[in-house]
Amino acid sequence: MTGWQELRIVINRTALEGAYAVLSKWGIDSFAVEDSDLMDQAQRLGWGDYFPDVEPSEQATIICYLAEDRLSKDQQEELRRDLLNLREFGFDPGPLVVSEGQVQEEDWAHAWKAYYHPLRIGQVLIQPAWEALERDPGPGQIVVELDPGMAFGTGTHPSTAMCIELLQHLNLEGRLVWDIGTGSGILAIVAAKLGAQVEAVDIDAVAVRAAKENRDLNGLSFPVSQGTLENLQGGPQVIVANIVAHVILPMLPEVQRVLSPKGYFIASGVIMERDGEILSAAKEAGLRLLRRKEQGEWAAYLFQRGD
């Protein structure tokens, strides 16, 4: 297991640009920044739906991880002096703090597997690909083997579980289903095993790769590509999107336009605070609500194209 030296630099936000230049001089080009102002900016710009409460602060924290070129105590003090000297260039570093810690690297891409176990959702059994089935599937049971890797979608998140439940409310045999934001491919695979013809897209190349691997793991064949709703052609009978509200909202008119008559739209990944927005915008777009589910702070919907 690899050990990393962690340096945490607490400095005034107004001096961040100067601090970046100092770190570059020291050959430190990879770091993370914790800044309450960045969280506020992301919320103002709508970069997501859920934001934790963060105490406002005029200071930010730069976090550096060093593996080979570790800095001695003397070097850390020299770095601290360089940061304090930013005053000569018009920056105020404020009550500067440079602290050291140690972090042991873990294989995070695999460590979580110890906590991921078979999960039954209706007639669907989500089976970790690295575990053997404890017993043969029962009558009507569908087994989905899954190794999500770094992509979203294990079935354990409420938004995913509710989508799987809603898919089972529909007769998918022979119907064209589009999975928008496929992640691990779990919803596309469930739909395919329920008899649907499936096309899946995601904007993330890592997700596309994971979805293809899981598709092949389940012995299925359907297209998975990098893209969005606008990149698909045809008239699906079902569209499913387990994303977030700020992505789903602008999709609604296009969903209404491309769905086949009486087609269905399953939407999930919506926090309760945005529930009213989704319902109002869907109605305005011409989508009729058939079912609505809640689990914890999340909501999911089954709409039908209103013709």
Image (tube, rainbow, N blue to C red):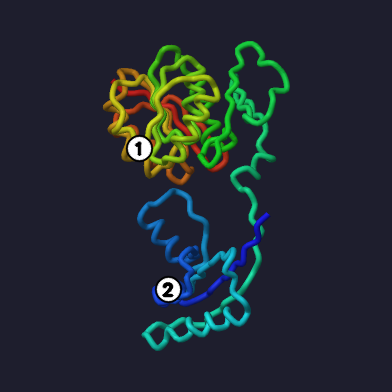
Secondary-structure class at tag 2? helix
Which residue does the numbered mark 2 point to in the structure image? 16
Residue type indicated by callout 1: Ser
Secondary-structure class at tag 1? helix
The image quadrant where one finds the C terminus is top left
Of callouts 1 and 2, the N-terminal one: 2
Percent of width and height locating residue 146: 58, 30
Percent of width and height locating residue 84: 48, 85
Which residue does the numbered mark 1 point to in the structure image? 280
The answer to whether residue 83 is above or below residue 165 is below
> Closer to the camera, 147 or 75?
75
Q: Using the rendered image of the protein, determine whether residue 190 is visible from the camera's viewpoint.
A: yes
Residue type indicated by callout 2: Leu
* Mark 1 vs mark 2, CA separation in Å: 42 Å
The image quadrant where one finds the N terminus is bottom right
Q: Nearer the viewer, mark 1 or mark 2?
A: 2
